[in-house]
Image (cartoon, grey):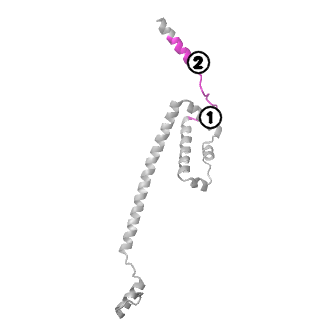
Amino acid sequence: MKKLMLLLTVLVGFMSCKEEVVHKPDNLIERDMMIDVMYDLSIFDAIKYQNPASIDTFKINPSQYIFKKYKIDSLQFAQSNTYYASNYIDYKEMYDELIQRIEAKKTVLDSLVKREEKKQEKLKADSLKKVKSNDVKKDSLLLKKKKTILKNGKDSLRIQ
């Protein structure tokens, strides 16, 4: 019984003395908004690495755009990110939600791309059918050549 009390006292002592590695900032971004910010940043990163000219063409600064969109500043984002990252279990859960969200969006976009490809293939096939079904005008030089051959019996346009 004494050993159990001593063990409990030691455990309570260790748990009560635990200090947070990173203190909660005063202007902490809410967890859900933080996931939204990280999602938008990951989308901009993907755009930047897939097609770098697109961001330069439209003269967009992704970080400034996101900070303006969510009405936060870079210091607030950095402090909130550090705070959430200090608890790796919660941070991993946030990233798991982020990955699920990206995968869901990817599935939707993949289906839209496939639908668009089918539409383009159908348009291409329809245009080929129209070309085949229309009477193709005969080449006037070819007709003239055939008439000359029929009159003379020789191919007058052929170089010998």
> How far across and how far down the image is residue 37, in percent?
56, 41
Residue 53, label in figure: none
> How far across and how far down the image is residue 80, in percent?
60, 34
Toward the front, the furthest residue is 160
From the viewer's side, name the closer residue of 75 and 142. Answer: 142
The region drawn magenta spans 7-30
Apparent side of residue 12 relative to residue 153 in the rendered image (left or right): right
Residue pictured at 41% horizontal, 56% vertical: 115
Of mark 2 and mark 1, the one earlier in the sequence is 2
Toward the top, the furthest residue is 2
> How far across and how far down the image is residue 158, in percent?
40, 87
Name the residue that disc number 1 marks: 79
Residue pictured at 54% horizontal, 53% vertical: 51
11 is within the stretch colored magenta: yes
Q: Helix or strand or loop: what does disc 1 sit on?
A: helix
25 is within the stretch colored magenta: yes
Reply above or below: 60 against 81.
below
Name the residue that disc number 2 marks: 17
Residue pictured at 52% horizontal, 51% vertical: 50
